[in-house]
Amino acid sequence: MRKQKLFGRSLLIAVISILSLYISLPRKIPVNLEIGKWRIEKTFSLPGIEWQLGPLSFRRDLEIKQGLDLKGGTQIVLEAQVQDLPEVEKTVALESAKTVIARRIDLYGISESVVQTAKNNQSYRLIVELPGVTDADEAKSLIGQTAKLEFWEMPQTAGPESSPSQAQLQPQPQPTNLTGKDLQKASVEFDRQTGQPVVSLVFTDEGREKFAEITKRNVGQRVGIYLDGAPLTVPVVQVPITDGRAIISGNMGIKEAKQLAISLNAGALPVGMTVVKETNIGATLGKESIAASVRAGLAGLLAVAAFMIIVYRKLGILADVALIIYGLITLTIYKLFPITLTLPGIAGFLLSIGMATDANILIFERLKEESARGLPLRAAVELGFGRAWDSIKDANVTTLLVAFILYNPFEWQFLNTSGMVRGFALTLTIGILISLFTGIVVSRTLIRTFYINNKK
């Protein structure tokens, strides 16, 4: 049973390592060989991942995503014109504008962009980072518009058994004169009967009359709510609504309800945006930074690998193999999710390499202590891993706590909100979690297979 379990773990590690190696390889591999009269100049391209099952799909190009400091691009700082809004609504308007601009950037096709809010006294600003953008004027015109919220009538479409000629006779969606200017407020409430979150709409006096007319002629039909031409929600009108108050319900959680309310308020509270600063970052900075980071990383890896082999000999070789597997798995995670790498993010990755090695050192030192007590090798290894785990767990939990504070996932204003600091915290967290797997599972399996068995 022990051998079967060990074989299963070894097979799992081998499969994970091979898959991680394939994903970690560059998608384009140039080959330039010259042997006598034969010369080969060719670039081999490796495909990404494309998987689809019904409505579910997963696509990744498996390229490393680079941040603004590595890839170059444009940073735009926008000032929100919120002087005429009540104090309590300024923050809501800023968050609404952030949501709208992020949506527009996604539609524009700019990948790995960052949109952050910044408040200082009476200054309410948005910081927009657009990696790889060369046409900054087009990007500014795109994100500088005021949000446009529209209500569309969505007549019933043809059924599945309708003929093509019948389908052509079906009425098309029609815009109405009801817009975001007619919406006073959108907020999250809870249904008294089901306890589920819903979004409550309150219209202005003029909007109440418009909405009443729309709902009267669309009972049983859908009314689409669009923001900047993209559908937010398409609810069904159950009964005519004449009091200017409506409820959007459905199978949505509190997070989805809050997001919908913010998006709706973006149309209800339109704010002008003024460009106050524009910074172009050249790609040369990124190339130099990447080259220096790669050199530093390789030098550190070689130094760590040499140290482990010199001090721990065969155990050090196994630790280096586990470290290579650690690196492959980490790069795989970066590509699959994907993770945007910045210079601080690379620093977090390099720091996590040292922590992964530290786990192996703790294990090996515990193993030495147990062997010095005269225990058999197998018993010394198992006890060494068990006792080292307590130290490894405590050290990594405290580091994970610090990384959590730096990442600030709940957007607490009294903590850090910088994107680059968050990148450092994210790569550090991923590295720690993977190092726990490689230090305890991979290293233990390698030692059981290639160290204990060879000592018999």
Image (cartoon, grey):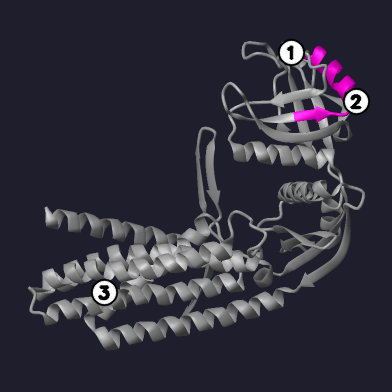
**Residue 370: % across, % down:** 15, 76
Q: Nearer the viewer, mark 1 or mark 2?
A: 2
Q: Nearer the viewer, residue 288 or 151?
A: 151
Q: Which residue is mark 2?
A: 205
Is 150 placed above or below 310 here? above
Mark pair 1, 2: CA separation: 19 Å
Look at 59% across and 32% down and name the residue there. 252
Residue of label 3: 363
Mark 3: secondary structure: helix
Q: Residues within 10 Å of mark 2 (few under 14, many from 20)?
A: few
Q: What stretch of residues is rendered in magenta?
A: 201-219
Dominant secondary structure of the magenta stretch? helix
Q: In the shown orientation, is residue 289 left or right of residue 21?
A: right
Mark 1 or mark 2: whose residue is earlier in sequence: 2
Q: Amino acid at mark 3?
A: Ile
Q: Is residue 113 left or right of residue 390?
A: right
Say whether marks 1 and 2 touch (CB < 8 Å): no
In the rendered image of this protein, does residue 91 appear above or below residue 165?
below
**Cβ–Cβ below 8 Å for labels 3 and 1?**
no
**Cα separation between marks 2 and 3:** 72 Å
Residue 61 at x, y = what percent? 56, 55
Viewer-closest of 214 and 111: 214
N-term mark: 3 or 1: 1
Label 1 sits on a secondary structure element that is loop
Amino acid on which disc 2 is placed: Asp
